[in-house]
Amino acid sequence: MRAMRISALLIALLVVNGCAEPGTEEQAEEAQGIHGGWVVSEWSQPEGVLMPAERGLFLFTESGHYSMMWVPTADRPDLPEEEPSDEELAAAYMTFVANSGRYSVSGNLITYEAYMARDPAYMSGFEPMGGEGNARNLTYTLNDDGTLILEFVPDDVFQAGTRAVLRRPGE
């Protein structure tokens, strides 16, 4: 079952890479410092509540593609070794955030659109595939210590004010 999930993820990443439009050279130059892989080192909520740095991986490519996956809770249930129930699968599914697609940068604002997403309703809004658009925004700051801060903008209905501090893997 785990191999099937990994295979599905790899296929999704290949589809995104093949279907999403590449970013412009100017966008790639402007976003140069964010290119590559980042892991979550800290989360904070608008109320100032710090959350445990649960697993998370953010990727930004030079071609204007992104992938972001994270577990927003420390209470993610383990699946049983035998066949999990529908309730157990749903509980694990709901404690995982994943989407990928294309992004662009203007100043310190990242605008991203999901081609693939854990949430089918969010994914179906992808404009080039017939939806009305699902673009969302993050502000970003590259710090002297090598960390990257991403903050969901105030008008984001899902995560307004949520802030993630990311670092390069192994640092």
Image (spheres, helix red, strand yellow):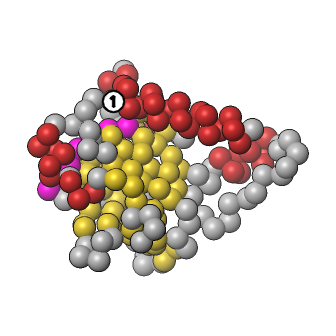
Pick whichever, 119 or 149, lies toward us: 149
Looking at the rendered structure, the secondary structure element under dot 1 is loop
The C terminus sits in image quarter: bottom left
Q: Main secondary structure of the magenta part?
A: strand
The N terminus sits in image quarter: top right
Figure check: 102 above or below 59? above
Pick whichever, 161 or 167, lies toward us: 167
Q: How many marks?
A: 1
Residue name at image x 23 percent, y 76 percent: 144
Where residue 164 appears, as percent x and y from the top left, is 40, 66
Q: Which residue reaches farthest left? A: 26
Figure check: 132 above or below 59? above
Q: Which residue reaches farthest front? A: 170
The residue singled out by tag 1 in the image is 20
Where residue 75 appears, as percent x and y from the top left, is 68, 65
**Residue type, numbered disc 1:** Ala
Where residue 90 appears, as percent x and y from the top left, is 71, 45
Q: Which residues are magenta?
A: 101-107
Residue name at image x 34 percent, y 59 percent: 152
Residue 156 visible to the viewer: no
Residue name at image x 32 percent, y 24 percent: 128
Figure check: 42 above or below 123? below
Residue 67 image-quadrant placement: top left
Residue name at image x 19 percent, y 59 percent: 108
Pick whichever, 95 or 46, lies toward us: 95
Label 1 Cα neighbours within 10 Å, binned few <14 / some 14-19 / many ≥20: many
Residue 135 image-quadrant placement: top left
